[in-house]
């Protein structure tokens, strides 16, 4: 599986990113993958490689490139509960500085770069994201309704911007929530808002999960839930992206 580090021109500089794609000498549908708040690291590269193996060009940008190249902060191999507070103390200023204006400006740059790569075919793209990346994925899809055909968010605060964001979506949507993030009542309210906006979606709580369940380098990791994430994500992309 070919992989490379690339540099994406943005209005504020250059964002380093990880790219993975099939080694067939062909063009493939593009997927923009937003990392969780911990950023690009081995587990994100593995998720990108896994997805690329199903026939996609996957681009994972460094969300916090304004503060430095990957790794923006040093991370332990395993981000256990004992170290999470100290890690988040470093991350929160970066997350808070990543305003909606920066998110949307970066999204323009990321999609422009993704769709002009020689390995990426014509047609719509997909956006997926984890944790805070799930919200960024939703914002990106809403800002680019003619270009983003599928969006998926996992254990992310996807409803943080309210129903106005949903009304701008034309993409097919899948949202996989952690039990500790969303109550059944809150899920019902979220899904009602998606219904009211006319969104084509699936949105569900993954059983027995806590926040961060896809990430194998954290205590939250749930292998069954990671597999369910693939079972939901791959058909969504297959339907939306004409991936032969």
Image (cartoon, rainbow, N blue to C red):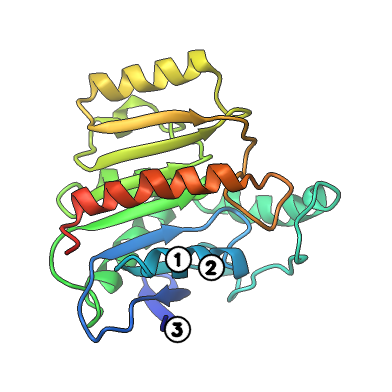
Q: Do the residues labelled 1 and 2 touch (CB within 8 Å)?
A: yes
Q: Which residue is drawn at 70% across and 67% down?
A: 73
Q: Distance from label 1 to label 2 (Cα)?
A: 6 Å
Q: Residue at x 33, y 17 (%)?
A: 192
> Left or right: where does residue 237 sit relative to residue 48?
left
Looking at marks 1 and 3 on the same chain, the residue that comes earlier in the sequence is marked by: 3
Q: Where is residue 27 in the image (x, y as percent from the top left)?
A: 20, 77
Q: For the view shown, which residue lies furthest in the right direction?
A: 82
Query: Mark 1 or mark 3, which is nearer to you?
Result: 1
Q: Distance from label 3 to label 2 (Cα)?
A: 13 Å
| Quarter residue 116 falls in | bottom left
Residue at image mark 3:
4
Residue 22: tell me if it is visible.
yes
**At numbered mark 3, what does the secondary structure look like: helix, strand or loop?**
strand
Residue at image mark 1:
50
| Quarter residue 67 falls in | bottom right
Q: Which residue is drawn at 13% across and 63% down?
A: 123
The front one of 123 and 56 is 56
Tell me if residue 87 comes above or below residue 244 in the rendering.
above
């Amino acid at each position: 599986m070919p992989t490379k580090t690339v540099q994406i021109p943005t209005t504020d500089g250059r964002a380093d990113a990880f790219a993975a794609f099939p080694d067939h000498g062909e063009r493939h549908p593009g997927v923009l993958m937003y990392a969780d708040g911990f950023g690009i690291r081995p587990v994100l590269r593995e998720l990108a490689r896994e997805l690329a193996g199903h026939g996609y060009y996957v681009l994972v940008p460094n969300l916090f490139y304004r503060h430095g190249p990957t790794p923006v902060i040093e991370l332990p191999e395993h981000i256990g509960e004992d170290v999470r507070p100290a890690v988040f103390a470093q991350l929160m200023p970066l997350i808070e500085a990543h305003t909606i204006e920066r998110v949307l400006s970066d999204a323009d740059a990321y999609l422009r770069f993704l769709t002009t790569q020689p390995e990426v075919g014509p047609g719509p793209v997909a956006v997926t994201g984890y944790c805070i990346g799930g919200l960024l994925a939703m914002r990106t899809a809403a800002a680019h309704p003619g270009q983003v055909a599928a969006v998926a968010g996992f254990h992310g605060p996807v409803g943080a911007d309210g129903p106005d964001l949903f009304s701008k979506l034309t993409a097919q949507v899948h949202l996989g929530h952690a039990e500790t993030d969303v109550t059944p009542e809150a899920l019902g309210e979220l899904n009602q808002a998606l219904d009211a906006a006319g969104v084509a979606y699936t949105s569900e709580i993954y059983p027995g999960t806590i926040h961060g369940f896809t990430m194998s380098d954290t205590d939250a990791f749930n292998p069954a839930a990671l597999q369910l994430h693939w079972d939901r994500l791959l058909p969504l992309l297959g339907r939306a992206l004409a991936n032969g």
